[in-house]
Amino acid sequence: MKILILGGTGAMGVHVSQLLSNWGNTVVVTTRQHRQSVDNIQYRVGNAKNATFLSTLLEEHWDAIVDFMIWSSADFRERYQDLLAATDQYIFTSSYRVYNDDEVITENSPRLLDTIKDEEYLKTDEYALAKARCENMLMSCGKSNWTIVRPAVTYDGSGRFQLTVLESDAWLWRAVHRIPVPIAEVMLDTEATMSWGGDVARMIALLVGNKMAFGEIFTVSTSEHLTWREISNLYSEVVPLTVTACALDRFERAHPSIYQIKYDRMFNRVIDNSKILAATHLQQDQLSSIHTKLPAELKSYLDKHHKGLAYNWPGAQAEYDKLVGGIPSLRYIMADGLIPIAKYVKHRM
């Protein structure tokens, strides 16, 4: 098969392209920077959001297109018909964040877009809403050569290690430097589902050319779940992570992702993955356990990048310092010059 992967140089895309290549397919991956083609993987340099570059790619016919791009609903509306026309199967990467709160998430669980009453939120094209609107375009297009995949939270040795809404560049740098990490108390005891990126990539790759996947939606995830407090304890097996619990309203003032907090991390996210297992003939016990895989991936990452860890930006660290008390980050930020110091002081006041 000849397969095009849009945005395929991220953590998930790298796994998917390698698997498809290993299985004998010819894989073409879009990239913003020059990369050396290897084995059956070829790289096309360009921005897949650029209409001219994308049109050139879609002049060819593809057996499958796997799309990892993050589209606004407006941009996707201009392109989705061309994407469907250029391939036998178009796989759209959505997100489990489209789901509203549910005791156990299945593909039929209610979506935020369809059920939420927050008019201010619905006026936005925030990530979860944009993904759902893109899904709607595919579901109403009158064709069935599409597949929608909804990954849950993933982790990966390339550096993707989330802690509630904090990315690794926010919390891991602090943990390594023995600086406490603030988390809203109420979020620590919510259930989360985290999957190893390699497992999710295998699920997606096994849907390529899979007739059971046409016109279908899949939540691609493990069914294993832990509280964020338990996940922080797993991280603590590798790094000296100290979590300081704080009030939700104070945490929200320090972190800009208000809707992600309110409409995802405040929900218990427990997933029934029986549909994707049935379509791919995988078993839950073939998937990596978070208890062993998460610490192993973090250790592997730190072994390679320990000296190169950086904080996300000085202002964010100042906001987190407000929540834990003192100015523990400042001594490290001072080494980067006056501008970072000024940004820190502005946000710490």
Image (cartoon, rainbow, N blue to C red):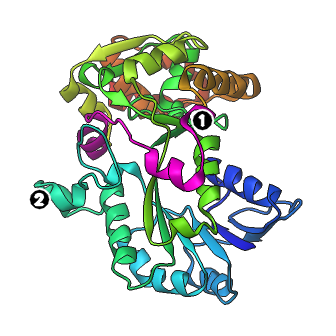
Residue 119, numbered label: 2
| Closer to us: 168 or 174 | 168
The quadrant holding residue 187 is top left
Q: As drawn, is 179 to the left or to the right of 196?
A: left
Which residue is drawn at the image coordinates 68% and 80% (left, top)?
A: 62
Q: As drawn, is 333 to the left or to the right of 134?
A: right
| Closer to us: 322 or 139 | 139
Image spot of residue 171 (x, y percent): 48, 25
| Closer to us: 291 or 51 | 291
Q: As drawn, is 91 to the left or to the right of 309?
A: left
**Contact? badges 2 and 1 (CB < 8 Å):** no
**Residue 278 inside the magenta-drawn segment:** yes
Which residue is drawn at the image coordinates 79% and 58% (left, top)?
A: 23
Name the image quarter holding the C terminus.
top left
Mark 1, secondary structure of its residue = loop
Q: Residue furthest right?
A: 39
Tag 1 residue = 287
The quadrant holding residue 160 is top right
Which residue is drawn at the image coordinates 32% and 68% (left, top)?
A: 133
At label 2, the amino acid type is Glu
Q: How many numbered marks have been drawn onto this rendered protein structure?
A: 2
Image spot of residue 303 (x, y percent): 74, 22
Mark 2, secondary structure of its residue = helix
Q: Which residues are magenta?
A: 258-286
At label 1, the amino acid type is Leu
